[in-house]
Image (spheres, coloured by chain):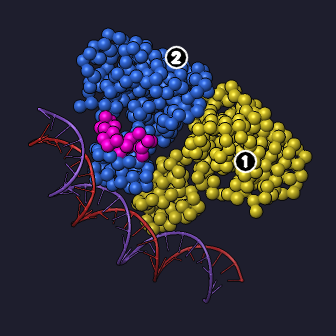
Chain colours: A yellow, B blue, C purple, D red
DNA sequence: GGGGTACTGTTCGAGTGTGTTCGAATTAGT
DNA sequence: ACTAATTCGAACACACTCGAACAGTACCCC
């Protein structure tokens, strides 16, 4: 068995069961403890799991599918931050806005906790947490209901129905992929439903997507590219894509992560 | 089980139910009392919980500075646990139930994670967390939406509307007070609204209230005493109150925390 | 063949987690 | 208010776990 395969198997196991022991794995794969420790170290270096005495656990307790929240937020920090800061500049005190689930919107939330009298609607528990921890009495945070996905988003008919009763000034939508043909996409069918409901409830749609999202196509389309009022991305975008987006999207904002 | 996992589990439990007992945890995880104490000490050092005589509680929101208060809340655990266990016995596989917010219902949630094919509706983030952490794919957990109260309950029109579309077999309602005149009460007006919506959505109403709740009157009434189909309490109730409840409530269940 | 790289196993001293014992401190009962 | 029952934490012993260092094996490229 290749080291690579073994490490992948270990990672699966950690994600499935929440934790593994070194001695257990060593016996199972017929290798020494030291080898398993080195595997765990390699995986921990990439932020995929957390080493602890005796074995390893998931990096943030409770992430079973698609790259976990904590792990993913390590990547492309610069781009995400720059995009979030630009988006935050579009929000004024007293606005009623919606934030979809995702790492970029969570980053944006961090930058919005100081905006007075904000009303925020979100289907993301981590995003709601950001505001809640800030504890500002003048801000209102509304969680949509629903069932919870592995990435801590709330989805399903309850969420869609809750959103249907609300009307927002602006929606900040974080997406997993965008392409000419499929538009903005996400890997989770239920999440696409909720996002579509958010789009309907909002006056203006602001999409947040760093350049790595271009060409990625999730299983489920949310809305076509042109539906966005504003698209905020970074300057890593190839020239062809940038030209196409300039023509398609009413307002294309390209930030520079410096 | 890894030490790290055990500590994470303990922390979850403290956050969900408000308190834990050393002996309880030792029996549950099959380790010695000393080990649990060391776990609690490690968590307390990181400021994640507060150690008290007999166990630990959440790191106090404000009011718990008087000596004895925190310790008492840990000791009353016996009643809560006994009530929760009795309530858990009323649930069958495949049921669709609702749990209100509160420490007693969080305790009940701990005892329901092993029930197959359960559907649970709740407006409490900690309660939802308990099921989510268990990660059973056959169970469905629906969070109602809404704004968050300091006690991590979701309230407001969004929550009420979400509940209005659902129909449950049974509601387990934790209350803050009960009295002959005011019925079951809670100190939070918005929470009373949500609880009333839950009562409407459920076929049967099961109220959970330890004996210390008798005579306490929160600012807002939920429903009159007689509206409950079952009331589960403990044997600390004074004779007069017990007689009155026996006559008023269709089914009064008195458990013995031994 | 020589040299490099990646992976693995072994050894060993240091570190960590756990159970037990026991005297002190806290709490409960009457 | 006094006594009995819990609970606490310090100290010790033991087993397990860790990581550094060194050495061996396999494979690839030149």
Q: Which mark is residue A248?
A: none
Residue A168 image offset from top left, x and y in percent: 73, 33
Comparing labels 1 and 2, the label whose residue is closer to the camera:
1
Q: Position of residue C12 (x, y in %)?
A: 35, 78
Query: Tag 1, which secondary structure?
Result: helix
Chain that bears disc 2: B
Residue under circle 1?
A88
Q: Nearer the viewer, residue B29 or A207?
A: A207
Q: Which residues are magenta?
A: B56-77
Q: Is residue B204 in view? A: no
Confirm whether the magenta stretch covers residue B70: yes
Tally the marks: 2
Residue A255 sits in which quadrant?
bottom right
Say if D2 sits above or below B192 in the image.
below
Q: Which residue is mark 2?
A: B200
Could you tell me which residue is drawn at 70 percent across and 59 percent down?
A: A78
User: Which quarter of the picture shows residue D11?
Assistant: bottom left
């Amino acid at each position: 068995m290749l080291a690579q395969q073994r490490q992948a198997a270990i990672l699966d196991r950690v994600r499935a069961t929440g934790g593994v022991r070194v001695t257990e794995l060593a016996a199972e794969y017929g290798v020494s403890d030291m080898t398993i420790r080195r595997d765990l170290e390699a995986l921990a270096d990439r932020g995929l799991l957390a080493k602890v005495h005796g074995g390893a656990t998931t990096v943030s307790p409770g992430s079973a599918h698609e790259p976990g929240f904590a792990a993913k937020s390590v990547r492309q920090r610069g781009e995400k931050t720059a995009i979030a800061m630009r988006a935050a500049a579009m929000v004024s005190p007293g606005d009623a806005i919606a934030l979809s689930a995702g790492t970029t919107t969570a980053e944006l939330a961090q930058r919005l906790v100081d905006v007075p009298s904000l009303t925020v609607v979100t289907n993301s528990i981590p995003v709601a947490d950001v505001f809640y921890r800030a504890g500002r009495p003048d801000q209102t945070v509304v969680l949509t209901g629903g069932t919870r996905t592995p990435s801590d988003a709330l989805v399903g008919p309850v969420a869609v129905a809750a959103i249907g009763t609300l009307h927002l000034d602006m929606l900040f939508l974080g997406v997993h992929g965008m392409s000419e043909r499929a538009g903005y996409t996400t890997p989770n069918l239920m999440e696409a439903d909720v996002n579509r409901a958010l789009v309907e409830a909002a006056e203006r749609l602001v999409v947040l997507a760093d350049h790595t999202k271009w060409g990625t196509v999730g299983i489920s389309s949310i809305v076509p590219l042109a539906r966005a009022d504003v698209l905020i991305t970074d300057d890593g975008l190839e020239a062809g894509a940038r030209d196409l987006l300039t023509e398609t999207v009413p307002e294309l904002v390209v930030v520079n992560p410096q």
